[in-house]
């Protein structure tokens, strides 16, 4: 079944079940499966009435039921949607609109002052009227649905040139990802899966919770921006969530784990934790396993360009004691991973190289950007078939049949002639007792060369309780795992690491501390 068929069938089977719950600090709004189906049909019909032109639609807003309705409506009317969260700055939103040249902009929240060209803008009030107006003669939308090779969504990610890149994901890519993703989610006695959503919809991690919820006929339990700012309000909502699957960045769950009440008592139905997007440390995985003894913890890996995640591993206490850092796992069915040298040739097992992803969930390339598409995407043989492949810019190696991530090629620096991977240092610092989170930053001279390194550490006790002597002790312990040139000159203990809107460590902000 493709995703649109699953949605239709889930709505028919459990019309009154909640498909989506929006949690803000002050209110909860819901969307039942029946509403999702009916509302998205009405909006899809309206989109077809506005124009038959299938240029992608920009959907702007936050975690509102109308966002989900709009995503599904776009797909049912044969066009890709491009989700833009309210946290995206105005200038960037304008860049995206300029790039897409949409015929329709769906503004679930008020748009900042930008030029939408000749696009029809549907504001929240318009949407409310459209989704609630029953048509006398509803049309059959199936002939309009996005096809298997059509682009289903476009997520804009930051480009190294400063211009965002629109990653185009087809319906087949999404369906292939969903099939694997669902296989990771433990299902207790046919109860519906309830997914905790942390990431904004403009970040592809949200595809994991949203589409696994929609495909399984479960519920997406979305945590709004405002709610994420107050742990006590957040925990109150979580307690009432009946959540069974957790999807977030490791940074976010570490913030939750800082509160001792983040345990199975708070979330007694929790069965699966799915992480992606940044390094999951052994310590975080171990703390989770002990706080949620009945739940499974997965470390998954992948860039937006390969539809959320393409490798995964179940982290058990045995895995965590055998491997530091943790593996990122084995490829999902339909995916092959190559680790290649600078010439693009496969390296030997155990040797580090660039991770190349080949398979059935690799994007068809960047929207309207053949140059950058050509630079990163190509065709590669996989089991005798030519499949799309993507050069990730990530460095990794294979050990014991599993893939390990060792850092971004672009987070590799040269200092005093040594080639150093900042994430390698971070992994070693993270393994020290008491360290919860760490980020290592290069300190550069005005000419750009690296002068020294600073490590920012979050410990399991307030920063103010650490003395110089304690810091010296940490440094001494590091000497047993790192060569001296890799030990940061400064170790700064802080209470928090700043995170980006996507929930990853914000290295730019950190540099300003
Ligand atoms: P994004 O496209 O925003 O999802 O970011 C993808 C990048 O996040 C990857 O290319 C990796 O650099 C990083 N990443 C994703 N998953 C993991 C993981 N499990 N461990 C470490 N880094 C990860």
Image (cartoon, grey):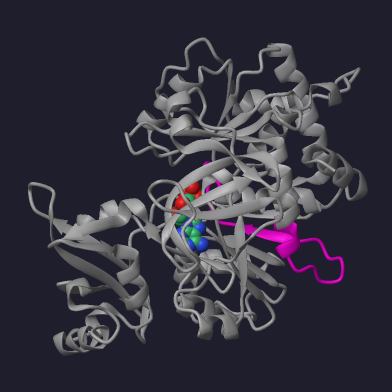
Residue 238 visible somewhere in the drawing: yes
Q: Mostly what secondary structure, the magenta segment?
A: loop
Q: From what the image shows, is residue 56 above or below residue 238?
A: above
Which residue is at the front of the view, 16 or 10?
A: 10
Q: Position of residue 146 (x, y in %)?
A: 74, 28
As for residue 416 lying within the magenta part, the answer is no
Q: Which residues are magenta?
A: 181-204
Q: Residue drawn at (52%, 27%), measured in percent from left and top?
A: 367
Which residue is at the front of the view, 410 or 228?
A: 410
Q: Is residue 57 left or right of residue 132?
A: left
Which residue is at the front of the view, 164 or 496?
A: 164
Q: Position of residue 161 (x, y in %)?
A: 32, 34
Q: Residue drawn at (50%, 29%), measured in percent from left and top?
A: 110
Count of labels in the image:
0
Q: Is residue 279 left or right of residue 55?
A: left
Q: Position of residue 339 (x, y in %)?
A: 49, 56
Q: Position of residue 121 (x, y in %)?
A: 56, 19
Quadrant in the picture for the N terminus: top right
Residue 42, by quadrant, is top right
Q: From what the image shows, is residue 322 above or below residue 406?
A: below
Q: From what the image shows, is residue 233 above or below residue 465?
A: above
Residue 26 visible somewhere in the drawing: no
As for residue 190 lying within the magenta part, the answer is yes
Quadrant in the picture for the C terminus: bottom left
Residue 386, by quadrant, is top right
Q: Residue drawn at (21%, 89%), measured in percent from left and top?
A: 473
Q: From what the image shows, is residue 23 above or below residue 187?
A: above
Q: Residue drawn at (81%, 42%), measured in percent from left and top?
A: 7
């Amino acid at each position: 079944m493709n995703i649109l068929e699953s949605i239709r069938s889930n709505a028919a089977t459990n019309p009154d079940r909640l498909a989506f719950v929006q949690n803000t600090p002050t209110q909860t709004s819901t969307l039942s499966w029946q509403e999702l189906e009916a509302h998205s049909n009405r909006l899809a019909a309206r989109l077809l009435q506005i124009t038959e032109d299938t240029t992608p639609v920009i959907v702007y807003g936050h975690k509102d039921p109308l966002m989900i309705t709009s995503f599904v409506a776009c797909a049912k009317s044969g066009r890709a949607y491009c989700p833009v969260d309210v946290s995206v700055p105005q200038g960037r939103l304008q860049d995206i609109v300029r790039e897409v040249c949409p015929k329709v902009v769906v503004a679930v929240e008020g748009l900042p002052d930008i030029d939408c060209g000749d696009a029809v803008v549907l504001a929240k009030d318009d949407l409310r009227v459209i989704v609630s107006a029953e048509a006398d003669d509803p049309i059959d939308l199936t002939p309009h649905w996005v096809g298997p090779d059509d682009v289903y969504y476009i997520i804009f990610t930051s480009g190294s040139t400063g211009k965002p890149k629109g990653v185009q994901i087809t319906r087949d890519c999404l369906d292939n990802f969903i099939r694997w993703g669902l296989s990771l989610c433990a299902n207790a006695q046919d109860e519906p899966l309830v997914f905790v959503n942390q990431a904004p919809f403009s970040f592809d991690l949200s595809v994991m919770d949203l589409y696994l919820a929609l495909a399984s006929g479960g519920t997406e339990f979305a945590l709004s921006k405002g709610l994420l700012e107050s742990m006590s309000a957040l925990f109150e909502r979580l307690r009432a969530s009946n959540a069974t699957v957790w999807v977030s960045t490791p940074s976010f769950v570490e913030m939750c784990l800082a509160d001792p009440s983040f345990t199975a008592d708070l979330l007694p139905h929790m069965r699966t934790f799915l992480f992606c997007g940044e390094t999951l440390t052994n310590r975080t995985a171990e703390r989770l396993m002990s706080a949620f003894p009945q739940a499974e913890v997965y470390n998954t890996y992948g860039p937006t360009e390969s539809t959320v995640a393409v490798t995964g591993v179940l982290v058990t206490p045995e895995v965590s004691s055998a491997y530091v850092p943790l593996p990122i796992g084995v490829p999902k069915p339909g995916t092959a991973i190559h680790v290649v040298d600078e010439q693009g040739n496969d390296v030997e097992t155990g040797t580090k190289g660039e991770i190349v992803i080949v398979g059935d969930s690799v994007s068809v390339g960047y929207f309207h950007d053949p140059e950058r598409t050509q630079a990163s995407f190509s065709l590669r043989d996989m089991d005798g078939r030519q499949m799309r492949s993507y050069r990730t810019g990530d460095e990794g190696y294979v050990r014991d049949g599993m893939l390990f991530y060792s850092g971004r090629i672009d987070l590799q620096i040269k200092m005093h002639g040594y080639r150093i991977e900042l994430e390698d240092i971070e992994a070693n610092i993270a393994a020290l007792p008491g360290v919860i989170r760490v980020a290592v930053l290069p300190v550069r001279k005005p000419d750009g060369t690296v002068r020294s390194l600073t490590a920012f550490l979050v410990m399991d006790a307030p920063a103010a309780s650490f003395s110089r002597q304690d810091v010296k002790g940490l440094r001494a312990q590091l000497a047993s795992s790192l060569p001296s040139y890799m030990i940061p000159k400064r170790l700064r203990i802080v209470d928090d690491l700043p995170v980006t809107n996507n929930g990853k460590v914000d290295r730019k902000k950190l540099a300003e501390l």
